[in-house]
Image (cartoon, rainbow, N blue to C red):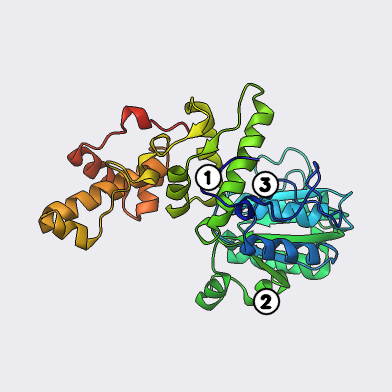
Amino acid sequence: MISTTGASAKEREPAEERDHNGRDGDGFCFENIAGSSRAIKTVLEKTKKVAHSDSSVLITGESGTGKELVAQAVHNNSPRCNGPMVVINCGAIPGELLESELFGHEKGSFTGAHKSRAGRFQMADKGTIFLDEIGDMSPELQVKLLRALQERKIERLGGAEVIEVDIRVISATNKDLDAEVKAGTFREDLFYRLNVIPVNIPPLRERTDDIPVLVEHFQKKFAGRTRSFRIKNLSGRARQAMVEYDWPGNIRELENLVERLAVLSENDVIELDDLPGYISRKGGAGALCSANSIFERGVGFHEAVEQFQRDLIYNALERTDWVKAKAATLLQMNRTTLVEKIKKMNIEPREEETPFF
């Protein structure tokens, strides 16, 4: 176990006692899912209940919260565990190609279709299909998906043969599908078909008790790949800073940070100075001051606004590995505008904080 200065024994307990394969006392496997908070325990208890059914599950939560891990746990502990679990990210594939990916196509059905190909639905027969980022699917394809889910039958693009499939459907989204239904961008009948059993994963900022457990979990994972690595302890100040940080990238961001610290921190204890500025809130990034502190420092309005903008931009760049397009999206501004502000404010990464993830 990782020793976390200032953390109680209760806070360091895993969600349940598990064996080396991640199985709890009931034989349920939660491999790669770690945590001790009440919030994650609620998710895991619901996961255990739904796994034994064959009902459709809709997993919701912000990006990076571990939706695919929960989907994998449902499949691994279901009667379909010996069948395949086929994953498809509906938001990563252009709409014109997604239909072919889902249902397959026949030779010559479109330019570049040089041979027939089975789709993901057919590949998932006798198993589970996981439709990630389902909220990004086009309305036109939603109609065809609904028909496939209702009838458990598909037709390849350009084909006439009806293919029966025996599958369980698990879907996930970081969008509010209720709002999407009201806005008319997501079909209500499809939503109800997918949302038979809803599972919501809370963001990391709402389960900060899990941070020490997750730090240990990711260190062990990294140690499994790098034999020379020694598991490090968290100092009280470092732990407190990590708990107070809001983790917009959730579990994925924390995992990346742990690997970064594993590579860069030379000591056996991770100190506050080892953390990036936007987490430790030292110096430039992350030093977003309250109104009272600004008045106490005698800073004028224009200077305070400029400093706030600078810190906000630096923070966004740090979180996106200094990829300006991603930072602009995070800041909800035009990339050209962001580039101009970076140049005008002469914002550059500090040498000691050059991103490694």
In three-dimensional space, the C-alpha distance between marks 3 and 1, rounded to whole angstroms, equals 43 Å
Residue 286's x, y, as percent? 32, 48
Q: Amino acid at mark 1?
A: Leu
Could you tell me which secondary element the residue under label 2 belongs to? helix
User: Which callout, 3 or 2, points at the residue further toward the start of the chain?
Assistant: 3
Crowding near the residue tagged with mark 3, few <14, some 14–19, many ≥20 C-alpha atoms within 10 Å: few
Left/right of residue 170 with respect to residue 269 in the rendered view = right
Residue 302's x, y, as percent? 12, 55
Q: Quadrant of residue 290?
A: bottom left
Give me the disc on residue 189.
2
Q: Quadrant of residue 187?
A: bottom right
User: Which callout, 3 or 1, points at the residue further toward the start of the chain?
Assistant: 3
Give me the disc on residue 109.
none
Left/right of residue 278 with respect to residue 339 in the rendered view = right
Crowding near the residue tagged with mark 2, few <14, some 14–19, many ≥20 C-alpha atoms within 10 Å: few
Q: Does 45 appear above or below 217?
A: below
Q: Which residue is mark 1?
A: 254
In three-dimensional space, the C-alpha distance between marks 3 and 2, rounded to whole angstroms, equals 30 Å
Q: Nearer the viewer, mark 3 or mark 2?
A: 2
Look at 67% across and 76% down and name the residue there: 189
Left/right of residue 102 with respect to residue 262 in the rendered view = right
Q: Nearer the viewer, mark 3 or mark 1?
A: 1
User: Which callout, 1 or 2, points at the residue further toward the start of the chain?
Assistant: 2
Could you tell me which secondary element the residue under label 3 belongs to? loop
Query: Which corner quadrant holds the N terminus?
Result: top right
Q: Is residue 127 visible?
A: yes
Q: Which residue is mark 3?
A: 110
Q: Nearer the viewer, mark 1 or mark 2?
A: 1
Asked whether the residues under the numbered discs 3 and 2 touch, taking CB atoms below 8 Å apart as contact, a structural biologist would say no
Q: Is residue 100 visible?
A: no
In three-dimensional space, the C-alpha distance between marks 1 and 2, rounded to whole angstroms, equals 37 Å
Could you tell me which secondary element the residue under label 1 belongs to? helix
